[in-house]
Every structure is written in C-alpha cells, then in structure tokens.
Image (spheres, grey):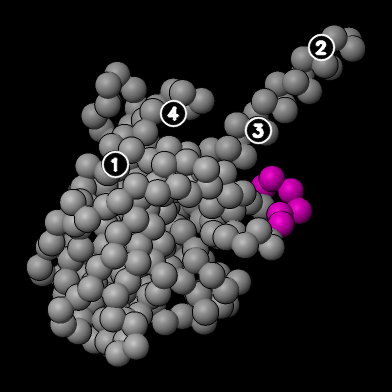
Amino acid sequence: MKKAKLIFLSCALVLLVATAASAHFGMLIPDTDALTQDTRSVNLTLSFSHPFEMVGMELEKPAEFFVVANNEQKTDLLGTLKQTTVMGHTAWQATYTPRQPGLYAFVFDPVPYKEDAENNYIRHITKVVIDGFGEGEEWHTPLGLKTEIVPLTRPFGNYAGNVFQGVVLLDGKPAPYTRVEVEYYNKDGKRTAPNGRMVTQEVIADSNGVFTFVCPWKGWWGFAGLNTDAKPYKGRELELGAVIWVEMQ
C-alpha cells in the first residue's frame, strides 16, 4: 500500500512539474509601446521563455522578422537582428526607426522549437503593436498570419486593470473555443504566485474565437492562443501559438 502511494505521489509530482512547465511564450518586447517626438526609435527584444517564472529557452534565429506599417507596407527586418542573451539563453534584438507616423506591427515567426517533454514542436507566431506619434489607427485589422490574435481592445495606451479582448484567428478564420494562456512578464521578479496554478492564467475563447481577460498589474502581458496544426512537423505534432504582447501602464 505504501509503495502504491509512493508511486502515486511521484506520478502526481511529475504531472505537476510538467503542467507548470508547459506554458511557453514567444516574447517580443519593445522598450516602448508609443513613439513620440522625444522617442523616435524603438528597441525590440525577441526571446522564448516562461515569462512569469523568468525561465528562458533557446531561440534560434527566427525564420521571419518583419514590421507592417499601417496594415499595408511589410518590411523585412531579419537582417537587423543581433544576437543577445535573455534569461541566460540565446535571444535577439533590433532597433527600428519609422519614417512617418502610423501603426507599426512587429512580428516574428520562429523556427519550430523541439519540445521533448511534450513530444511536439512549438511555433509561436508573435507580435506586438506600437503607436507611432499618436497616429496608430485600425489596430484591429488582421495581418494575414497563419495564426494571430486580432485585438478588440486597443493594444497600446492601456491602464493596469483594463480588460483586454481579442479574437483568435487560424488560417484567417475565427478559431472557436481556443485555449488562451496568459502570463505576466515578471521582469523585476517582484511578483510571486501562491501556487503553480496561478503562474499561467487560462481562458477559453467563445464560439466566435473571442476571449476576454482583465490585466491587474502594470507591465507586459502575453496572450497565446493555442491550436494544433493539421500537418505534423518532422513526425511530431506542431503547436501553433498566436501570441500578442500588450503593456498595461
């Protein structure tokens, strides 16, 4: 009986650790969500991690990194990336200076990450939207990505405590009942979770792919709408993550 109990507890512990470690996030964090006359350039950091727990993972140089200006002009920025380190692991950084006011959506599409713990690959298509000189309009327009979160709440200029709402798209269509994982970027390490369940928040999108979440703290919040690609990748299931980062001030 004691042996059976020990085996049960050991299995429970493994399950708990696996659950706590399951929330991966592509991260695309700018040093500002608004360009002004005093701040004309934006510095962006690309990484892959567990943002609340501040546990990093290796991020291979992305397959794509680009910016879309005013939902129209797409500019390749892959050649501007410089290697750096975030949370002790390989990450990337870039600086961008827009030529005119407007809305700027930055996106990176990674090389799928091999996750042996889950026997799959992870592809988190990650974006962040920046207001350029107060002219950031039409922020709810899709970019035409394989999967993405289209914001229904303006994705910049928000107070802590605001609701963030978005719709998860997969192949350009709303993805009903998508599981959306939410984590806070605990950059200064001041936040602690009372237990493992509180590290990653979860909401389920409705039948129209729409989800809603209240962000209680100042700082950057990541939202990852998770689906499985219809086609396996290198013989394994491919997790498709539609990720967007939003700052609450």
Q: Are marks 1 and 2 in contact (CB under 8 Å)?
A: no
Point out the tag, 4 or 1, that comes first from the N-terminus.
1
Mark 3 secondary-structure assignment: helix
Tell me the residue that label 3 is attached to. Answer: 17
Point out the tag, 1 or 2, that comes first from the N-terminus.
2
In the rendered image, the vertical position of residue 224 relative to residue 61, given as above or below? below
Tell me the residue that label 4 is attached to. Answer: 115
Mark 2 secondary-structure assignment: helix
Q: Are marks 2 and 3 in contact (CB under 8 Å)?
A: no
Residue 216 appears at what percent x and percent y? 60, 72
Tell me the residue that label 2 is attached to. Answer: 4
In the rendered image, the vertical position of residue 154 relative to residue 244, given as above or below? below
Graded by Cα atoms within 10 Å as few (under 14), some (14 to 19) or many (20 or more), the crowding at tag 2 reads few
Point out the tag, 4 or 3, that comes first from the N-terminus.
3
Q: Amino acid at mark 1?
A: Lys
Query: Which of label 4 and label 2 is nearer to you?
Result: 4
Q: Amino acid at mark 2?
A: Ala
Point out the tag, 4 or 2, that comes first from the N-terminus.
2
The alpha-carbon separation of the residues under discs 1 and 3 comes to 28 Å
The alpha-carbon separation of the residues under discs 2 and 3 comes to 20 Å
